[in-house]
Image: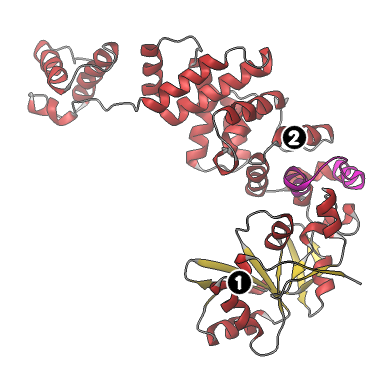
Amino acid sequence: MAEQRRLDPQPWMNAPATRSVMAALTAEGGEARFVGGCVRDSVIGRPVRDIDIATHEPPERVMALLKKAGLKAIPTGIEHGTVTAVVGADHFEITTLRTDVETFGRRAEVAFTDDWAEDAARRDLTINALSLTQDGVLHDPFGGLADIEAGRVRFVGDAETRITEDVLRALRFFRFYAYYGRPPIDTEALAAVKKLAPLLPTLSGERIWGELVRLLRAPDPAAVCRLMEAHGVLSPLFPGQPWIARLAALVEVEALRGIAGEAADPLRRLAAMVRLDADFARALAARLKLSRKERVRLAAMAAAPDRIAAEAAPADSRRVIYSLGTEIYRDAVLLRWAGERADLGRGAKDGAYAGLLDQCDSWPPPELPVKGADALRLGLTAGPKVGRALARVEAWWIDQDFVPDRAACLARLKSIVKNGENRG
């Protein structure tokens, strides 16, 4: 029989938007409970972000109940039993209780049920199988509360069966361990993960990257990545020898700069964990189906650290900041700093690299004070000559450490046009 305990009322449970949704779902005698992360995080005392709700009411009935209460209802995944309720700026994902008839990796053939235990049994981890009533009764069919208190992350039922149903659960196991686990790690889960790791390449790049993003934002992703490497999980995701020591060092230097939590950048942490060159960056971006912006940034992070010197003079650093832009320059400094820390140990050049970042933070790159329109007004015709003339002015302006103002740059441009220095 499922263990039941009580949870003190939580602000998110009693918020007007939450109460309105729960009232709508139970208005005609139905039952609804909170499930998933909002329950787990409330038990631990962590902030709740997303509120998920389960009910035995079928999805069409959920839509009708919400609309009857005057609430917006969106059939976001109605064929799988999921409806989203929108109350002002708040969104609530509501799912009808389900049982798996047959699984197909990411997809599953499901049947709706009114059995809470059957629904809990299809969830991946015991700490995700909790449910909570509006009045604070916790339902715990698989010992998730004890696992939370012990820092134990384990699968519901047989670990190998759970992972075979969807191999992404191998990555989810490590991600949840990074946030909720404490040693010793569950040996049954590790054995199952190691056995089934060769199936990981069957996952889409989007799903892999989605899990890696969450894992890499963890407070100490390097420790978990070492476990993943030891149990054959990293090599099926991307080739090459991982550089986990640099990832660990990056987390340390980020902490020195006050970067943590949501401010921790998963793409930069990914770049730290692998030994990037231009070809590998392209291959990795393609494998993970990164966005165009992420691809460009990852490619820059493959090359930019080589342009960073801890002992660079301020004027030289400004040239590099201007060339790379502040975001890539900051990435490059942090990666170079982490690499040297990984190779040389803590403190070797911390002050110098911190100084480079301070300069980047305090010096926004200026814009060239002259434009193409200025060249046209000086008599050049539209075309390549304009670009060449501006490039000459820009090179001179950079050599002058960005000091010349608009008047000086216009005079320089006029001289270039007059003397024909813009010829290709």
Q: Which mark is residue 142?
A: none
Query: Is 372 colored magenta in this rendering?
Result: no
Looking at this view, is 220 or 65 the one in front? 220
Location of residue 39 with respect to 418 vertically, above or below: below
Query: Is 193 colored magenta in this rendering?
Result: yes
Dot 2, crowdedness within 10 Å: few (<14), some or many (≥20)? many
Rendering coords of residue 125 (x, y %): 81, 56
Question: Which residue lies at the image location 92% right of the left edge and 72% below the top edge?
Answer: 1
Image quadrant where one finds the C terminus: top left
Question: Would you say the residues marked 2 and 1 are in contact, meaning their CB atoms lie under 8 Å apart?
Answer: no
| Residue with the most extreme front position | 8
| Residue with the most extreme bottom position | 28
Location of residue 281 with respect to 53 vertically, above or below: above
Location of residue 69 with respect to 87 vertically, above or below: below
Amino acid type at mark 2: Cys
Residue 283, can we see it?
no
Secondary element at tag 1: helix
Q: Which mark is residue 14?
A: 1
Disc 2 marks which residue? 225
Looking at this view, is 219 or 166 the one in front? 219
For the record, the magenta segment spans: 171-195
Secondary element at tag 2: helix
Amino acid type at mark 1: Asn
